[in-house]
Image: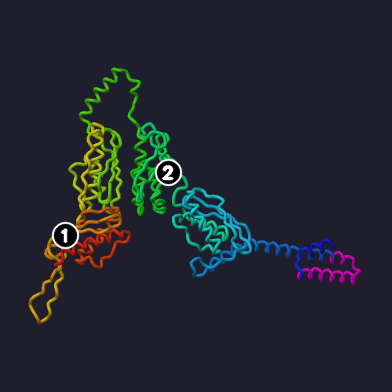
């Protein structure tokens, strides 16, 4: 009995401790006043023990519930705190339950695992303990969100520009650790670059095993890639350098690599919103693969002298009917906004594939790309009409293919290289209708004529753009500005031509170079064109 009471005293709270003591005292009193009944003593003792054991069980149950409540306090408390954020940029500071927690979130290409330490209600450290597949440079950049979380003591922080997905993965992992909220989002890119499941026949592969490097021109400069060939299959493509490309655009453009690996061909679509960078990567891959092409060596070393002579005779006879030699040839020509590059693949003397790389506007280039199918069907780039509404892009494609096919001729490209015909500089022409002054009612039947401030003729002048002088000529006919022609410029084409399109149309619309808005992103080129036109119109004033 004493041992039972001793155990009850350790488990029960002070208030509950009184209950078994009172029961025991009552039982003892009852036993002393009924000594004559020995059977009653036995029943009383049995009753007391059962009662005390019941109280002990209730006390143990209460202790277990209290422990369970403490273990779940963290999630409920942190969840409540996260829902009470203020309206400031980063939200009000939260209070967290002390302890060390681990959580997992989804980054750009795989899972990110963190360890979070909370002390005195504050997050004192966040450690990245596992990064499954995100690129190191982006993860390093994304670590900036850790500083923000520690500084503001809230999970309501901004992601890091240029490493958005890795940033989100870290925030989600911390939230999972502190609040138990699972990150159900999916990765943007596959966690690895496995070889395609449907492998081509190795013996028919057109590529030699090895590692090859290639380069192309993106938006801001040269893009370099590394291509790995194993058993005739493209198994890996890595962007080695792209210093001139913006991080967010480069990240988006890299997603096309998975498509190249799947199709085993660089003839893929560019990534919407990152066209120039995509073209740079595609061109670099094409350049690398051109170096991986198998040479048609055959088994010449094992042939006898007579066999070689017979083959030579057959080849000479066949060459008379061959228009193109097998191989991959690259040609260039002038498009609207710069050089257009065509990569032409010849197999069995036939044009099999044509890949185009260009910096022309996507809408116009897409329309002009219909010419590729026409060229392959006709097996020539001669006597093919340009696509209406995409003249300059069409000429870029046709002339670059012609340049490539010239190299694929019977002489293996040893003929004199003919420089592709450059497309003419576009002219902005427009003939607006002069607005007539309305006839005052009841005063005169004659309509006053608009008096133009300009004399008819063509006037030329120049002004400074971004890289140097811009020279324009302005034509006035019947007192109306009808044409603005660019004679000379040295600004970058991707900035100059959008400036020309926007500015010249405004001038023709209002018939003045005063009060013209510059084109966003091409301010200096815009101002150069405006000032040159204004100086030319000064000459045209009566």
| Residue 39 x, y percent position in the rendering | 88, 65
The colour scheme of the drawn protein is rainbow
Q: Which residue is tagged 1?
A: 459
Using residue 370 as the reference point, say whether residue 59 is left or right of it.
right
| Most common SS among magenta residues | helix
Res. 258 image quadrant = top left
- Is residue 23 located in the magenta-colored stretch of the structure? yes
For residue 240, above or below residue 184: above
- Is residue 468 located in the magenta-colored stretch of the structure? no
| Label 2 CA crowd tier, 10 Å (few <14, some 14–19, many 20+) | some
Foreground pick, 284 / 183: 284
Q: Which residues are magenta?
A: 15-44
Mark 1 vs mark 2: which is more N-terminal? 2
Q: What kind of element bears circle 1?
A: strand
| Residue 408 x, y percent position in the rendering | 25, 35
Q: Nearer the viewer, mark 1 or mark 2?
A: 1
Foreground pick, 246 / 324: 246
Q: Which mark identifies residue 238? A: 2
| Residue 246 x, y percent position in the rendering | 40, 53
Using residue 422 as the reference point, say whether residue 231 is left or right of it.
right
Using residue 294 as the reference point, say whether residue 50 is left or right of it.
right
Res. 504 image quadrant = bottom left
Q: What kind of element bears circle 2?
A: strand
Residue visible at 59% across and 66% down? 95
């Amino acid at each position: 009995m004493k041992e039972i009471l001793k155990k009850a005293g350790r488990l029960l709270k002070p208030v509950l401790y009184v209950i078994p003591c009172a029961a025991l005292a009552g039982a003892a009193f009852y036993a002393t006043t009924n000594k004559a009944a020995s059977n009653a003593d036995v029943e009383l003792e049995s009753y007391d023990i059962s009662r005390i054991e019941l109280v002990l069980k209730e006390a143990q149950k209460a202790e277990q519930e209290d422990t369970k409540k403490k273990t779940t306090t963290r999630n409920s408390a942190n969840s409540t705190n996260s829902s009470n954020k203020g309206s400031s940029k980063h939200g009000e500071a939260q209070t967290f339950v002390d302890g060390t927690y681990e959580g997992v979130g989804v980054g750009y290409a795989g899972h990110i695992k963190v360890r979070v330490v909370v002390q005195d209600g504050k997050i004192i450290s966040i450690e990245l303990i596992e990064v499954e597949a995100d690129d190191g440079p982006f993860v390093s950049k994304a670590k900036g969100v850790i500083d923000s979380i520690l500084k503001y003591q809230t999970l309501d922080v901004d992601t890091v520009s240029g490493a958005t997905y890795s940033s989100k993965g870290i925030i989600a992992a911390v939230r999972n650790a502190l609040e138990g909220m699972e990150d159900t989002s999916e990765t943007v890119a596959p966690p690895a670059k496995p070889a395609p499941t449907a492998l081509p026949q190795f013996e028919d592969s057109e590529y030699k095993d090895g590692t090859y490097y290639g380069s192309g021109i993106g938006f801001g400069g040269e893009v370099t890639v590394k291509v790995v060939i194993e058993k005739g299959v493209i198994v890996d493509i890595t962007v080695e350098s792209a210093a001139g490309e913006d991080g967010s655009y480069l990240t988006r453009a890299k997603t096309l690599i998975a498509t190249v690996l799947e199709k085993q061909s660089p003839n893929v679509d560019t990534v919407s919103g990152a066209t120039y960078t995509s073209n740079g990567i595609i061109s670099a891959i094409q350049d690398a693969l051109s170096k991986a092409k198998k040479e048609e060596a055959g088994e010449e070393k094992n042939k006898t002298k007579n066999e070689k002579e017979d083959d030579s005779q057959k080849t000479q006879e066949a060459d008379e009917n061959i228009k193109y030699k097998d191989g991959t040839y690259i040609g260039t020509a002038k498009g609207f906004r710069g050089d257009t590059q065509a990569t032409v693949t010849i197999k069995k003397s036939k044009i099999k594939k044509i890949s185009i790389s260009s910096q022309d506007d996507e809408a116009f280039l897409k329309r002009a790309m219909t010419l590729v199918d026409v060229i392959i069907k006709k097996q020539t780039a001669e006597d093919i009409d340009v696509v209406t509404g995409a003249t300059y892009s069409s000429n870029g494609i046709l002339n670059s293919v012609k340049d490539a096919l010239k190299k694929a001729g019977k002489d293996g490209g040893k003929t004199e290289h003919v420089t592709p015909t450059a497309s003419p500089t576009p002219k902005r022409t427009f003939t607006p209708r002069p607005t007539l002054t309305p006839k005052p009612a009841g005063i005169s039947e004659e309509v006053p004529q608009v008096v133009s401030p300009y004399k008819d003729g063509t006037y030329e002048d120049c002004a400074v753009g971004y890289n140097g002088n811009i020279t324009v000529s302005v034509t006035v006919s019947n007192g109306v500005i009808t044409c603005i022609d660019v004679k000379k410029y040295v600004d970058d084409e991707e900035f100059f031509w959008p400036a020309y399109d926007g500015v010249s149309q405004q001038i023709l619309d209002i018939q003045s170079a005063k009060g013209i808005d510059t084109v966003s992103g091409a301010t200096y080129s815009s101002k150069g064109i405006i000032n040159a036109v204004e100086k030319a119109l000064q000459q045209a004033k009566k």
